[in-house]
Image (spheres, grey):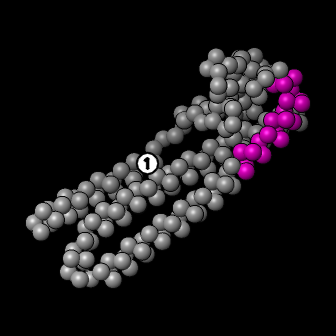
Amino acid sequence: MKKFILLAVLLSLSLPQLFAHEESLLGDFNDIAFNIREKKFKYEDADLFIYDKNDKYSDEILITAEYELYINHKKIRVDKNTSKLLKIYYQEIYDIREEALLIGIEGAKIGLSGAKLGLTAVISLPLLLFGNEEEFEDRMEEAGEELEQKGEELEEQGEKLEEKAESLEDLEDELRARVEELDDLFWF
Protein backbone atom coordinates (compact mmCIF):
# COMPACT_ATOMS: atom_id res chain seq x y z
CA MET A 1 0.00 0.00 0.00
CA LYS A 2 2.87 2.39 0.77
CA LYS A 3 4.31 1.79 -2.71
CA PHE A 4 0.96 2.61 -4.28
CA ILE A 5 0.64 5.87 -2.31
CA LEU A 6 4.20 6.83 -3.28
CA LEU A 7 3.40 6.12 -6.96
CA ALA A 8 0.20 8.19 -6.77
CA VAL A 9 2.07 11.11 -5.20
CA LEU A 10 4.81 10.96 -7.84
CA LEU A 11 2.27 10.85 -10.65
CA SER A 12 0.29 13.74 -9.19
CA LEU A 13 3.48 15.79 -9.06
CA SER A 14 3.98 15.08 -12.77
CA LEU A 15 0.60 16.53 -13.75
CA PRO A 16 1.65 20.21 -13.49
CA GLN A 17 4.55 19.51 -15.86
CA LEU A 18 2.13 17.91 -18.30
CA PHE A 19 -0.16 20.95 -18.13
CA ALA A 20 2.80 23.28 -18.66
CA HIS A 21 3.91 21.30 -21.71
CA GLU A 22 0.48 21.82 -23.27
CA GLU A 23 1.04 25.59 -23.27
CA SER A 24 4.36 25.23 -25.09
CA LEU A 25 2.55 23.74 -28.10
CA LEU A 26 1.43 27.21 -29.11
CA GLY A 27 4.80 28.36 -30.43
CA ASP A 28 5.84 30.40 -33.46
CA PHE A 29 5.08 28.56 -36.70
CA ASN A 30 6.21 31.18 -39.21
CA ASP A 31 9.10 29.18 -40.68
CA ILE A 32 7.45 25.78 -40.95
CA ALA A 33 7.68 24.11 -44.34
CA PHE A 34 4.79 21.83 -45.23
CA ASN A 35 3.89 19.53 -48.09
CA ILE A 36 0.74 19.21 -50.11
CA ARG A 37 0.93 16.34 -52.55
CA GLU A 38 4.24 16.69 -54.42
CA LYS A 39 4.93 20.32 -53.49
CA LYS A 40 6.77 21.83 -50.55
CA PHE A 41 5.49 25.20 -49.33
CA LYS A 42 7.18 27.66 -47.02
CA TYR A 43 6.26 31.15 -45.95
CA GLU A 44 9.16 33.45 -45.19
CA ASP A 45 7.86 36.68 -43.80
CA ALA A 46 4.82 37.12 -46.05
CA ASP A 47 6.31 35.53 -49.18
CA LEU A 48 5.30 32.05 -50.31
CA PHE A 49 8.03 29.78 -51.67
CA ILE A 50 7.11 26.60 -53.54
CA TYR A 51 9.43 23.71 -54.42
CA ASP A 52 9.21 20.17 -55.73
CA LYS A 53 9.22 18.18 -52.48
CA ASN A 54 11.06 15.26 -54.10
CA ASP A 55 13.96 17.33 -55.44
CA LYS A 56 15.95 19.58 -53.11
CA TYR A 57 17.55 21.21 -56.17
CA SER A 58 14.24 21.99 -57.84
CA ASP A 59 13.19 25.24 -59.35
CA GLU A 60 11.90 27.86 -56.95
CA ILE A 61 8.54 29.53 -57.31
CA LEU A 62 7.91 32.66 -55.29
CA ILE A 63 4.59 34.41 -54.85
CA THR A 64 5.14 37.64 -52.96
CA ALA A 65 2.71 39.22 -50.52
CA GLU A 66 1.82 41.59 -53.37
CA TYR A 67 0.99 38.52 -55.53
CA GLU A 68 3.92 38.94 -57.88
CA LEU A 69 5.30 35.77 -59.40
CA TYR A 70 8.98 34.84 -59.62
CA ILE A 71 10.46 31.63 -60.94
CA ASN A 72 14.12 31.06 -60.09
CA HIS A 73 14.45 34.73 -59.09
CA LYS A 74 13.10 35.93 -62.45
CA LYS A 75 9.98 38.08 -62.31
CA ILE A 76 7.20 36.71 -64.48
CA ARG A 77 4.83 39.25 -66.01
CA VAL A 78 1.18 38.34 -65.56
CA ASP A 79 -2.10 40.01 -66.49
CA LYS A 80 -4.71 41.18 -63.96
CA ASN A 81 -6.76 37.98 -64.15
CA THR A 82 -3.69 35.85 -63.52
CA SER A 83 -2.71 38.12 -60.65
CA LYS A 84 -6.15 37.52 -59.12
CA LEU A 85 -5.62 33.77 -59.46
CA LEU A 86 -2.23 34.07 -57.77
CA LYS A 87 -3.91 35.94 -54.92
CA ILE A 88 -6.54 33.22 -54.52
CA TYR A 89 -3.88 30.49 -54.66
CA TYR A 90 -1.65 32.30 -52.15
CA GLN A 91 -4.56 32.77 -49.75
CA GLU A 92 -5.77 29.16 -50.12
CA ILE A 93 -2.31 27.83 -49.29
CA TYR A 94 -2.10 30.18 -46.30
CA ASP A 95 -5.54 29.11 -45.05
CA ILE A 96 -4.66 25.42 -45.43
CA ARG A 97 -1.44 25.97 -43.48
CA GLU A 98 -3.23 27.77 -40.65
CA GLU A 99 -5.97 25.14 -40.42
CA ALA A 100 -3.42 22.32 -40.47
CA LEU A 101 -1.47 23.95 -37.64
CA LEU A 102 -4.63 24.35 -35.58
CA ILE A 103 -5.60 20.73 -36.22
CA GLY A 104 -2.10 19.63 -35.19
CA ILE A 105 -2.26 21.64 -31.98
CA GLU A 106 -5.72 20.27 -31.17
CA GLY A 107 -4.48 16.74 -31.88
CA ALA A 108 -1.56 17.25 -29.51
CA LYS A 109 -3.92 18.59 -26.86
CA ILE A 110 -6.14 15.52 -27.25
CA GLY A 111 -3.05 13.33 -26.85
CA LEU A 112 -2.06 15.19 -23.71
CA SER A 113 -5.61 14.89 -22.40
CA GLY A 114 -5.40 11.14 -22.98
CA ALA A 115 -2.17 11.03 -21.00
CA LYS A 116 -3.78 13.04 -18.23
CA LEU A 117 -6.70 10.62 -18.23
CA GLY A 118 -4.29 7.73 -17.83
CA LEU A 119 -2.57 9.44 -14.92
CA THR A 120 -5.93 10.25 -13.36
CA ALA A 121 -6.90 6.60 -13.67
CA VAL A 122 -3.76 5.53 -11.82
CA ILE A 123 -4.21 8.19 -9.15
CA SER A 124 -7.88 7.21 -8.72
CA LEU A 125 -7.08 3.54 -8.10
CA PRO A 126 -7.81 3.92 -4.37
CA LEU A 127 -11.49 4.21 -5.36
CA LEU A 128 -11.23 0.64 -6.62
CA LEU A 129 -9.29 -0.54 -3.62
CA PHE A 130 -11.83 0.87 -1.19
CA GLY A 131 -14.83 -0.59 -2.99
CA ASN A 132 -16.01 2.41 -5.04
CA GLU A 133 -15.65 0.72 -8.41
CA GLU A 134 -18.78 2.27 -9.94
CA GLU A 135 -17.63 5.87 -9.28
CA PHE A 136 -14.24 5.07 -10.78
CA GLU A 137 -15.80 3.55 -13.90
CA ASP A 138 -18.18 6.50 -14.29
CA ARG A 139 -15.33 9.02 -14.09
CA MET A 140 -13.19 7.18 -16.61
CA GLU A 141 -16.06 6.52 -19.02
CA GLU A 142 -17.17 10.17 -19.01
CA ALA A 143 -13.65 11.44 -19.64
CA GLY A 144 -13.09 8.82 -22.35
CA GLU A 145 -16.29 9.81 -24.15
CA GLU A 146 -15.24 13.47 -24.17
CA LEU A 147 -11.89 12.55 -25.70
CA GLU A 148 -13.56 10.36 -28.30
CA GLN A 149 -15.93 13.17 -29.30
CA LYS A 150 -13.04 15.63 -29.62
CA GLY A 151 -11.18 13.09 -31.74
CA GLU A 152 -14.15 12.65 -34.07
CA GLU A 153 -14.52 16.42 -34.45
CA LEU A 154 -10.84 16.68 -35.27
CA GLU A 155 -11.15 13.92 -37.86
CA GLU A 156 -13.99 15.84 -39.56
CA GLN A 157 -11.86 18.98 -39.65
CA GLY A 158 -9.03 16.97 -41.19
CA GLU A 159 -11.31 15.58 -43.90
CA LYS A 160 -12.52 19.09 -44.79
CA LEU A 161 -8.93 20.28 -44.96
CA GLU A 162 -8.02 17.40 -47.25
CA GLU A 163 -10.87 18.37 -49.58
CA LYS A 164 -9.64 21.96 -49.59
CA ALA A 165 -6.12 20.81 -50.49
CA GLU A 166 -7.49 18.69 -53.33
CA SER A 167 -9.35 21.70 -54.74
CA LEU A 168 -5.97 23.39 -55.30
CA GLU A 169 -5.48 21.22 -58.38
CA ASP A 170 -8.04 23.26 -60.32
CA LEU A 171 -6.27 26.51 -59.43
CA GLU A 172 -2.92 25.03 -60.40
CA ASP A 173 -4.34 23.82 -63.73
CA GLU A 174 -5.62 27.29 -64.46
CA LEU A 175 -2.34 28.91 -63.47
CA ARG A 176 -0.38 26.51 -65.70
CA ALA A 177 -2.73 27.33 -68.58
CA ARG A 178 -2.13 31.06 -68.10
CA VAL A 179 1.60 31.09 -67.26
CA GLU A 180 3.84 29.24 -69.70
CA GLU A 181 6.78 29.27 -67.28
CA LEU A 182 4.70 27.38 -64.68
CA ASP A 183 3.58 24.92 -67.33
CA ASP A 184 7.24 24.27 -68.19
CA LEU A 185 7.89 23.07 -64.63
CA PHE A 186 7.03 19.35 -64.76
CA TRP A 187 6.26 19.25 -61.02
CA PHE A 188 3.91 22.24 -60.76
Residue in view at x 28 percent, y 59 percent: 15
Answer with the quarter of the image where residue 55 lies. top right
The answer to whether one can see residue 137 in this image is yes
Q: Is residue 31 magenta?
A: no
Residue in view at x 53 percent, y 49 percent: 104
| In this view, 14 is above or below 87 | below
Name the side, left or right, on which 40 lies relative to 187.
left
Q: Nearer the viewer, residue 174 or 145?
A: 145
Residue in view at x 46 percent, y 58 percent: 110
| In this view, 66 is above or below 8 | above
Q: Which residue is mark 1?
A: 25
Q: How many marks?
A: 1
Task: Give, as a single range, the part of the protein colored magenta.
Answer: 163-183
Residue in view at x 62 percent, y 43 percent: 97
The answer to whether one can see residue 79 in this image is no
| In this view, 47 is above or below 170 | above
Mark 1: amino acid: Leu
Magenta residues: mostly which secondary structure? helix
Q: Label 1's element?
A: loop
Q: Nearer the viewer, residue 90 or 188?
A: 188
Rendered-image quadrant of the C terminus:
top right
